[in-house]
Image (spheres, coloured by chain):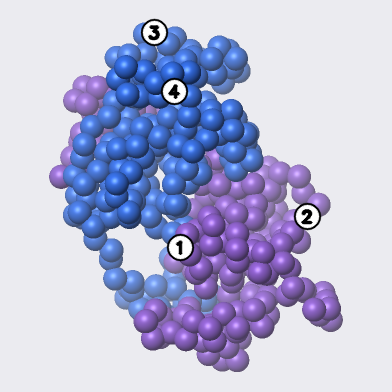
Chain colours: A blue, B purple
Amino acid sequence: MPDRQDGMQTDTICQYSVDQYIDKLKAFHGNFAPGLLIGGFMVDAAARRMAEHEFVDAICESDSCLLDAIQMLTPCTVGNGWLKIVNTGRFALALYEKRSGVGVRVGIDASKLDRYPEIKNWLMRLKSKHEQDGAALLSEIKAAGPDILSVRPVQVSAALRTKKPGDPIGICESCGEAFPNNGSRLCLACQGMDLYG
Amino acid sequence: MPDRQDGMQTDTICQYSVDQYIDKLKAFHGNFAPGLLIGGFMVDAAARRMAEHEFVDAICESDSCLLDAIQMLTPCTVGNGWLKIVNTGRFALALYEKRSGVGVRVGIDASKLDRYPEIKNWLMRLKSKHEQDGAALLSEIKAAGPDILSVRPVQVSAALRTKKPGDPIGICESCGEAFPNNGSRLCLACQGMDLYG
């Protein structure tokens, strides 16, 4: 598929073909998820615009499958701290230069979804998973590519970029395990979390 | 390295040799992290005990690098929802059968760390990263293997296993994006989060 006039491409997602990316997401995420394919186009759109920066961190505005698109396609993972979850509930992400906070945010432009009824059904939860037409949804996502995205420059707030110093570590007087001791003698679990019945 | 008398092995982490696992963690996590190697032995210890179960979910009690050990070694990711973060502050994880909640929790037995001073320095933050002896720490972690772990059966609480039904999706009156509408006309970001300055 040739490049589109607006400079956006729909035939690749970062260094992968769309089909290679789908194989990769099945291997990591365990199954195909529509949001992960849309998420792939979102990461791609952001990564293209951040290509000149060496150290790029990520924010995911959702605790959904979108996280895995970022983890698969960038060096940012939840475990290495370069990917932060800031759950606004919106299906959106930002990539930004680690120190300056200069970055790009990519979301979904809901106003463009009337042309993509299956994507709209999925995003707006108008149909249950069982009622969705999976094949039509996949075709629409592939056809839409970045066409349904909204992309804008952002400046990530200093509060999100400031690494908090770790608390000193203490030993919980109840369970005997190490925990960040911010003044309590008990870890959060032993303070009464409903974790293990 | 032969199996130890207690049936624990230190020469493999799940399907990988220790060195293969270290290569894998560098590729996914971006760099070597001591906690990820300990985390590998932790996942291995739990996975061995859950091998007969088909659908195994995970809890990570920390928002640290331990998350990436779980994401690398199991099908559970933060994005597919099979891995939940329940941040008690303890360096611990649990694997459990998805429906019944029957599982295994693995933590670090702080009482065993006197024999492993570099691991103790790391876990208890007694030395800064700069002051740690990285090579000695790596040797100690490899030598210790599962020896420093505490393993116990758990029953994961029903509250953690109950999937909450999704809120209906609305369009935020401010930003125009889709969001889970639990009664507000504005998404959480437009309600005043300090996200993009």
Report whether A4 appears left or right of A19.
left
Tell me which chain the residue with mark 3 is part of: A
Report whether A99 appears left or right of A136.
left
Q: Which mark is residue A115?
A: 3
Tell me which chain the residue with mark 4 is part of: A
Tell me which chain the residue with mark 1 is part of: B
Give, as a three-letter code, the residue at label 3: Arg
Check the image and report above or below for A116 versus A171.
above
Dot 3 or dot 4, earlier in sequence = 4
Residue visible at 52% across and 35% down in the picture = A16
Q: How far apart are the alpha carbons under marks 1 and 4?
A: 35 Å
Q: Which mark is residue B51?
A: 2
For numbered disc 2, what is the local secondary structure? loop
Per the image, the residue denoted by label 4 is A10
Give, as a three-letter code, the residue at label 4: Thr
Tell me which chain the residue with mark 2 is part of: B
- Dots 1, 4 in contact, CB < 8 A: no
- Dots 2, 1 in contact, CB < 8 A: no
Query: How many marks do you count on the picture?
Result: 4
Within 10 angstroms of label 4, few (less than 14), some, or many (20 or more) residues? many
Per the image, the residue denoted by label 1 is B64
Quarter residue B8 falls in:
bottom right
Dot 2 or dot 1, earlier in sequence = 2
Q: Is residue A196 visible?
A: no
Q: Name the residue at the left extreme.
A: B197
For numbered disc 4, what is the local secondary structure? loop
